[in-house]
Image (cartoon, rainbow, N blue to C red):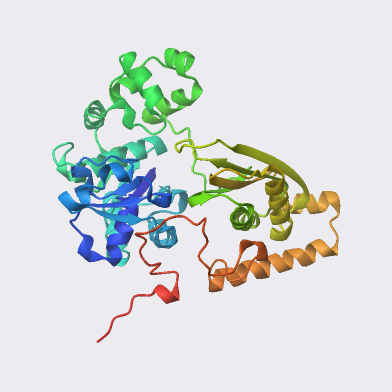
Amino acid sequence: MYALLDGNNFYVAAEVAFRPSLAGKPVVVLSNNDGCVISRSNEARALGIKMGAPWFRVSHLADSAGLVALSANFALYGDISDRMMSLAAGLGPTQEIYSIDECFIGLDGMRGDLVERARKIRGRILQWIGVPCCIGIAPTKTLAKLSNHVAKRAERKPGSYPAHLSQVCNLGAMPKSDVDELMQATAVGEVWGVGSRIGAQLQLAGVQTVHDLVRYDTGTLRSRWGVVLERTQRELQGVPCIELDESPAPRKEIASTRSFGRPITSIEPLIEAVTAFATTAAVKLRGQASVASQVLVFARTSPFREGPRFSRSCVVPVRPTRDTRHLVAAAIAGVRKIYAPGYALAKAGVMLLDLQPDDLVQGELGLDEPHEDQTQLMTALDAINQRYGRGAIGIASAGPAGATKHWQMRQERKTPAYTTNWAELPIVRA
């Protein structure tokens, strides 16, 4: 048995937890540079605001409907996620963190009423952290996702599903006839792994609901859409095909990219930005105990603005390393190679390529003592930044620490980092 725990409107919920005055109001969280809606409260949803809607298209609702828009505060969301996941782990012996607001829990060996246990965990998360969530329980991961959808929809839209399935739904404990009825009431596009393109193709083939997909001829399904959709069908039929991934495999590429808050027209701020991106990527690289042998750097203008177009990239080879200094030096070398004046650059980024496990590379190349010293230096660097905040110490080409950079993202509506920055800690005065 598996459980899928999912925070409801997670980014908005994290904001409301520290600003209770926002409860019951239409609230949206915007993407980088305050561009598009990436989270919305139920009240904002009721106004017809779609996920991904550009802010400039819905900003008029701030005056007419009291819509509150906030800039994304990922430091806050990441910390709240860590706290939520630590409590969710109490649901069962194994856990796979699927995204910032979702995790699968393996329930093998758990006794007693699973629904009651799930409700207690949900109540604990709501009381201790302030984030509401829904939990779906089922014999497979795909069914657990479906079960979570039922629990969330039953809470959000009373009458769409039976009220007793709200917040927590256990498909594994229901009679087959009831499960079939729920599947008949659920569109095929709601299935985990069925995207919009395949969903449209299935509908043209007469597969309108989840129940239709479960009963569709398996051979035809495999020949037309491949083994991945066949696996999805078998999961919906109750046959486990997707195992719990407690330790995700190391990434084969690591990227750090950003759109600029304002266009860049000279090389100095571009070097600052690329230094910051390479530094971030290097921390992720060390986090998975890997080294990189190539650094890709790119820069481009906006495809939506008038003016001359620019889009170039460059790959710089390096000796296998996880040292921030070497990776930054390679990125800057790439910038100097591709840069040309006369363009208003809107985005740049760094990708670390040809990643290999650090211990394997040391064994093959016999890396000497200086490499060990560099590793210790990078460990100290990460520890200082972890304790005193990102950018407390770094590479000089990133510019003065703490200074506002011309290229930084626009975040005009960003709330304080309540839980990760001492300077932004809420103060209560008697």
Judge left or right: residue 380 versus residue 169: right
Q: Nearer the viewer, residue 198 or 381?
A: 381
Q: Position of residue 198 (x, y in %)?
A: 40, 22
Judge left or right: residue 292 versus residue 398: right
Q: Position of residue 308 (x, y in %)?
A: 54, 36
Q: Position of residue 32 (x, y in %)?
A: 43, 50
Q: Quadrant of residue 326?
A: bottom right
Q: Nearer the viewer, residue 205 or 240?
A: 205
Judge left or right: residue 240 versus residue 328: left
Q: Residue at x 17, y 36 (%)?
A: 160
Q: Quadrant of the N terminus?
A: top left
Q: Residue at x 26, y 44 (%)?
A: 58
Determine whether 317 is above or below 424 in the image.
above
Determine whether 352 is above or below 387 in the image.
above
Judge left or right: residue 248 versus residue 324: left
Q: Is residue 323 visible?
A: yes
Q: Nearer the viewer, residue 131 or 62?
A: 62
Q: Quadrant of the C terminus?
A: bottom left
